[in-house]
Structures are given as structure tokens and as C-alpha cells.
Image: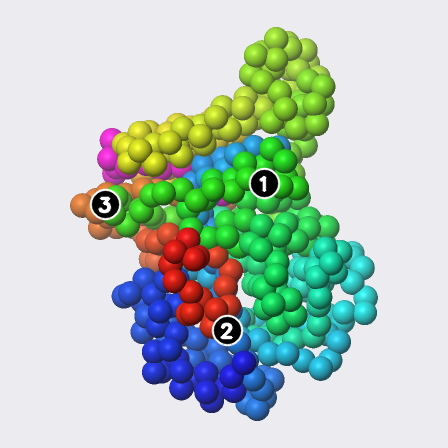
Amino acid sequence: MNTIKNIITQIKSGVYDRAFMRMYGFNAIEVHRERYKKAVNKFGEIFGTEKEVMLFSAPGRTEIGGNHTDHNHGRVLAASVNLDVIGVASLSSENCIKIKSEGFDMDTVYLDDLAVQNDQKGCSASLIRGMAESFVKNGFNIGGFDAYTTSDVLKGSGLSSSAAFEVLIGTILNSLYNSRKADGVKIAQMAQYAENVHFGKPCGLMDQMASSIGGVITIDFNDPTNPITEKVNFDFDKSGYNLCIVDTGGNHADLTPEYASITIEMKAVSKSLGVSYLRETSMEKLMNKLPELRKLHGDRAVLRAIHFLRENQRVTKQVEALEFGDFDEFCRLIIESGHSSFEYLQNSYSSCNVTEQGLPLALCLAQGVLNDNGAWRVHGGGFAGTTQNFVPGELLDSFCSVMEGVFGKNSCHVLKIRPVGGVELDYLSTQNSTTLG
């Protein structure tokens, strides 16, 4: 650990430039020097300038393929992005974790009581407590620390700001108290536990895995206790396409019932097919019982099950297209996935607010601008929020202009794929790219 004064000096002198370049790209080094210096100074104002501190980062993620497949043990294709939650942290002699996040009140979680607090569900304190409890349940050490965090992961964007926050906490605990013994998969699994059990959101594991592991990855959740994760050998920067996330500015009221209905309906269909999860059945078996399933569960549940079975196979095709360098086929599959989410999964707008359809409008506009050049789809959980678009360089300006003309200035975010997941910056600075993937 370094004193605040030393850390500031090191940031200014370029000690962390290698880490910044890996996480954010060469052109963003100076921006993040200033960002981290500001965060360190803010930590000093809150917790004291005499403390020794360490720097941490956990990225947001983009789901590329496998829309709502992870919770039924399916396959996904995902990547970490160059938006992240950063943390300045210091060991504490107190038996509690104190985290001050920019724009929010201080969270203080005492480590002598890690039971679920029902009155804190949906709050950031529940994620902190959940991560601490999960570390203990999995045989890892915990202890007190103080931290200041700030995030540029867009809330409600489908980039998973909550998963990034969970992974950041896990990365801090892993470094401060466990000598980095927990790998990325284990941190992700513990983060999912925190979100499911303590926070109260029934999410799958994809968000946490993409944030924790980093890069472009495909994950097979056939056995969620031992997911198979593989790096995908493709450099999006060399494709000539830009990853654009469009924030439609929708109403981000509690959409948990909408998300939960997908899981509930899919599992109801799987149960009627004699299995626990849709991954364990086939399209042939579903079609053979289609009339009965419609009567038992309704057409929407059946359509959602069909989406899962097709989308699960589509992920494999997307990975193959990328690894063979066939970006045209990849884009075709992205559009196909988007149609399936819209028409069968039905997560492009909330059934409780049918007059607000920002996502369908953004998809319509993207199709008009891009036509046969690129791809567009709903992004993340859906219902409100963002679309994902792959835009060729020559159409980027016109695409952003159209989107921001409708959804407002800075609604079109041009992102890069980040090659590393949750990290301690001192460790990242000493590792070569081959070691980190």
C-alpha cells in the first residue's frame, strides 16, 4: 500500500499509465489520471490523508448474445467495457466496511452480523453485506476496510452497474484479505449470491462473470456451479465497427416483476416438460407438447421458451462467426437475436406501460440508418433502457446524430471492449497482457 501523497505522485508520473491503457485505451490515459487523482483526494477528505490506500476497478459489461438465457443454464456471449466503478480502499482496524460512493450517503456494514436484512433489500448496503457473507460461506477471509467509489457505468443502461459494484467489493476483499486467491469465476458467483439473496433481484450469473473475468467471453452455464468460460479470439477494434449503446431515457421504475416473469414462465414450461431448466430439454420435446403447454401456461410463456432454445444455439453460431472473422454473419445473427427478443421473449417494453416504447423506437431508427450495414438489438434485461448497435465507422456520425436528435444529447455512447475484468491496479501494472488475457 502507498500513502495518499505517494499514490498521487505515482499517478502523475505515469506509474499507472500501463494499467490505464489496458483498461481504457491509449487516448484516455490523461482523462483517467485526473479521474483517479480526484478519487484519491476525495478518499483523503472523507477518511483522512494519513491512510495508506490501494486502487481498484471493476467494469460494466455488454451482453452480445444470449438474451435471458443464463438463468435457465444456457450459453451467453458477453464482454467487459471501458466504463467502470473505481475504488480507493484502505485497511481498517474496525470490524466494519465503510463505503462512500459519489452522490450517495455512506454505507456502513458491521461484519459481526451478516444475516439478510429485509429492510435493506434493494440498497447498496445489502450488496456489501452479501459479498462479505458470501466470502465467509466460501471459506475466504473478510475484514474491515474504508473505500471511496465513483462510477461512470450508466445506471439503467444494461451495462450492469450493480454487478460492477459487487465485483469491486469482491476484488477489494480478495486483495486486502485473501492474497487474490479467489479467481474471477468465484468472485462472480459470490456476487450473484449477494444480488439474489441480499439485494433481492433474481439475476443470472452473466453480468457478474463478464465484469469479473473481462474481455470477450462465452460462458456455458449448463452446470452453474462450474460454468465453462472461454475467451473469444476477436479484436473488435480491428473490425471497423463501433459498439454504440443508446440510452432511450425510459422510466426506470421498479422493473423487477417484469424480469422475474421471464424466469417464472420459462421455469413453468420446463417443469411441464419434466426438467428443472429449459437447457435440459429440446425444441422437439417442446413442439410435441405445444397444445398442452399453451393451455397450462399461455402463449407468452411458450414463446419465451422457444426464444431460449433458439437463442441458446445462436450463441454458438455467433462465437463461430467471430472466431472465423465473419463479421457480416455475426451482424446477421445479432439482428436475428434482436428480433427474437422483441417478438418472442417480449422484453422491448413494459407490459405495465405500453405507451412508452423507447426501445422499439430506437431499434426502428437504427434499422433506418444502418439498413444492411451493421446490427441492432435490445440490450441487457430490456423493458426500458438501452439498445446495442454495431455501427460502421463511416455511419457513426449520422447514427449518433439521429439518436441524439430523438433521445437527447449524450444518449449515444460509443464504447470499447475492455480486455480485463475486476482488478487491483498495482497488480495489473505488473502483469503482461498474455497473463491477463
Residue at x 61% of width, y 8% of height: 288
Question: What amino acid is found at the position of numbered circle 3 in the picture?
Answer: Gly
Residue 301 in sight = no
Q: Residues within 10 Å of mark 2 (few under 14, many from 20)?
A: many
Query: How far is disc 2 from disc 1 in space, using C-alphas?
Result: 29 Å
Going by the numbered disc 1, the residue's amino acid type is Pro
Q: Residue furthest left?
A: 394
43 to the left or right of 92: left
**Looking at the image, residue 292 lies above or below residue 436:** above
Instruction: Look at the numbered disc 1 and give the secondary structure of its residue.
Output: loop
- Magenta residue check for 371: yes
Residue 357: horizontal and vertical position, in percent?
46, 39
Q: As rendered, which of 85 and 139 lies closer to the eye?
A: 139
Q: Which residue is mark 3?
A: 240
Residue 227: mark in rendering? 1
Which residue lies under the disc numbered 2? Answer: 55
Q: Position of residue 18 (x, y in %)?
A: 35, 69
Which element is circle 3 on?
A: loop
Name above or below for residue 163 compared with residue 93.
above
Judged by depth in the image, the label closer to the viewer, 2 or 3, is 2
Q: How is the image coloured?
A: rainbow
242 over 316 or under it: above or below: below
Q: Nearer the viewer, mark 1 or mark 3?
A: 1
Q: In this picture, which residue range is highlighted in magenta? A: 367-380
Q: Which mark, by number, is residue 175?
A: none
Nearer to me, 184 or 108: 184
Q: Residue at x 48, y 31 (%)?
A: 341
The crowding category of the residue bearing disc 3, from other C-alpha atoms within 10 Å (few below 14, some 14 to 19, many at least 20), is: few
Task: Write the residue at 70% across / 23% down.
Answer: 275
Name which of mark 2 and mark 1 comes first in the sequence.
Answer: 2
